[in-house]
Image: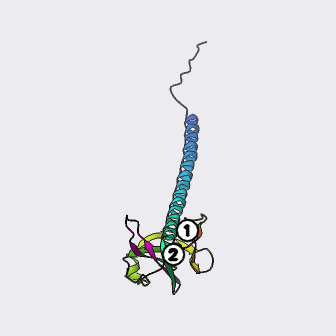
Amino acid sequence: MIARLRREDGFSLTEMLVAAALFALVVFVAGGIFIGQAAAQRQVSAVTSATTDAQSAGNAIDGGIRNSTGFKLRTVGTDQFLVARVAGTGATLQWECRAWYYSSSAGTIRSTTATPGTPMSPPTATALESWILLVDGVTPRTGSTIFSDSGATLTVAFNAVTGEGAQPVAISFSTSPLAGVTENSTCY
């Protein structure tokens, strides 16, 4: 009897199909993990950005009112306009007029400054575009306003939208002007 030698020069078609299926499964699982991580990173970035913007806006308002001789709050339709005479940050004491505007339709808080002696009034829609945008995606925590005053105390309470499906960032605080400083405001 003659013995035949079996020679294996490569993979069979079945082995190739099984290997290709396993490779496709690994690529599919790895791609799904990568896409999931990318989506989670986008959401974390959106929440971080909104949180930073909301906290910065809150700090700007709080710092301005705490360093002021007083403030005046006005309602303009469904919007709010807040003005204060604020101490500057230079080596010598200089005052400036600072204003914040909450636009309920745009969901924004904007800010601007002017020199003392320049009474500030609510801006037109065109003028408001030149103001510094502090935060967008703003909604009141309760009711329809973000600012409320009681005597010499200002309360600020708003939510800032952080992205699709994420919880909004809640900002809420009360602040008061400088104690013992006589108000002599020509800002409002």
Quadrant where the image shows the N terminus: top right
Q: Is residue 62 magenta?
A: no
Q: What residue type is labelled 2?
A: Gly
Tell which of 74 and 71 is nearer to you.
71
How many tags in the picture? 2
Query: Which residue appears at 51% of the width and 57% of the height?
Result: 45
Q: Position of residue 109 (x, y in %)?
A: 48, 74
Residue 161 is tagged as 1
**Amino acid found under the numbered disc labelled 1:** Val
Rendering coords of residue 51 (x, y %): 54, 62
From the image, give the main secondary structure of the stretch colored magenta: strand
State yes or no: discs 2 and 1 in contact (Cβ < 8 Å): yes
Question: Which portion, as a residue range, is magenta?
Answer: 79-96
Residue 115 is left or right of residue 45, and the answer is left
> Residue 102: in sight, yes or no?
no
Q: Mark 2 points at which residue?
A: 107
Tag 2 secondary structure: loop
Residue 57 vs 39, above or below: the answer is: below
